[in-house]
Image (spheres, rainbow, N blue to C red):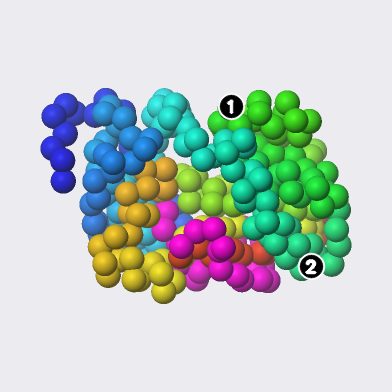
């Protein structure tokens, strides 16, 4: 582990309770050096402490980055996230995902919101399949690039949506583990999803075989992922979904990421 010569000026805001169950007892499971991460900068903490909740078992980081520290991370947007680099490359995997969601829905078309659209592959492919697709992302370069091509790619988060906007599908493709408080994020998403609408969530699964093998080899890249605050199991994700108004109805494994899981859940309730 490298020694950090200067104290970081941008620190994590410590969690005061487990972000899943609100429990207040945890143990530090491990501490990992994140200085080799492409988004790392010297005024950010050099290590990530991972905590295990003693109440529910959820695995999360010792804290999250506020707006200033998050902006610092954004300064080095991963070039692979930009549309010109990857939207076409990932079109086929995005198409399989859109097809699967559409089969579960029993319908093609309607409004699809992709939160954290990244390289734009899912947003642009959903549009191609006939959805009225809207994207949200915190990275400006990607939004500008897709807007220039005529897509409704907006710079911002769920909080920036008009309260009256409703969607038939909302996707969080490898996004929820980046959010400090995923229960709040899912609750906000539920408010924009019509009853019976579908939620798509993908993220790494700590209970998957690849995860366990990577851990055994001491080569699991997710422990040094500076942008992640959570490492979910399928069980923990289902529990969170059920608590926030969803019922999981489809499980698949990721074609893009090792150890990745892809879950479709239906929005329960009868309010409009
Ligand atoms: Zn907990």
Tell me if I can see residue 165 in this picture: yes
- On screen, residue 231 above or below 114: below
Which segment did they paint magenta?
230-258
In this rendered view, identify the residue nearer to me: 35 or 88: 88
Q: CA distance from mark 2 to mark 1?
A: 33 Å
Corner quadrant of residue 18 = bottom left
Mark 2: few/some/many CA within 10 Å (<14, 14-19, 20+): few
Q: Secondary structure at mark 2?
A: helix
The residue positioned 39% from the left and 40% from the top of the image is 64
Residue at the spot of label 2: 103
Residue 201: horizontal and vertical position, in percent? 60, 57
Tell me if I can see residue 192 in this picture: no
Residue 30: horizontal and vertical position, in percent? 24, 57
- On screen, residue 217 above or below 184: below
The residue positioned 82% from the left and 52% from the top of the image is 129
- On screen, residue 88 above or below 261: above
In this rendered view, identify the residue nearer to me: 37 or 49: 37
Mark 1: few/some/many CA within 10 Å (<14, 14-19, 20+): some
Taking the magenta stretch, the answer to whether it contains residue 103 is no
Residue at the spot of label 1: 140
Q: Secondary structure at mark 1?
A: helix
Q: Point out the residue furthest to the bottom here.
A: 209
Q: Of marks 2 and 1, which one's residue comes earlier in the chain?
A: 2
From the viewer's perspective, is 228 left or right of 271? left
Residue 231: horizontal and vertical position, in percent? 41, 58
Taking the magenta stretch, the answer to whether it contains residue 232 is yes
- On screen, residue 268 above or below 169: below
In this rendered view, identify the residue nearer to me: 237 or 254: 254
């Amino acid at each position: 582990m490298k020694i950090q010569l200067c104290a970081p000026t941008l620190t994590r805001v410590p969690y005061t309770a487990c972000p899943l169950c609100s429990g207040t007892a945890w143990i530090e499971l491990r501490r990992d050096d994140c200085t080799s991460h492409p988004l790392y900068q010297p005024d950010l903490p050099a290590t990530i402490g991972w905590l295990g909740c003693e109440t529910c078992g959820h695995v999360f980081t010792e804290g999250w980055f506020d707006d200033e520290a998050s902006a610092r991370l954004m300064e080095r947007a991963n070039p692979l996230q930009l549309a010109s680099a990857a939207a076409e490359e990932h079109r086929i995997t995005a198409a399989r995902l859109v097809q699967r969601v559409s089969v579960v829905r029993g319908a093609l078309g309607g409004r699809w919101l992709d939160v954290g659209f990244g390289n734009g592959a899912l947003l642009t492919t959903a549009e191609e399949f006939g959805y009225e697709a809207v994207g949200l992302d915190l990275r400006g370069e990607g939004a500008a690039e897709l807007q220039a091509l005529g897509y409704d790619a907006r710079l911002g988060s769920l909080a920036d949506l008009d309260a009256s906007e409703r969607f038939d599908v909302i996707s969080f493709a490898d996004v929820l583990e980046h959010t400090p408080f995923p229960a709040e994020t899912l609750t906000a998403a539920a408010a924009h999803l019509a009853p019976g609408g579908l939620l798509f969530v993908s993220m790494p699964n700590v209970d998957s075989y690849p995860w366990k093998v990577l851990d055994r080899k001491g080569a699991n890249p997710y422990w040094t992922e500076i942008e992640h605050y959570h490492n979910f199991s399928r069980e923990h994700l289902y529990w969170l979904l059920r608590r926030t108004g969803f019922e999981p109805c489809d499980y698949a494994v990721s074609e893009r990421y090792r150890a990745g899981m892809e879950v479709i859940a239906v929005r329960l309730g009868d309010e409009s």
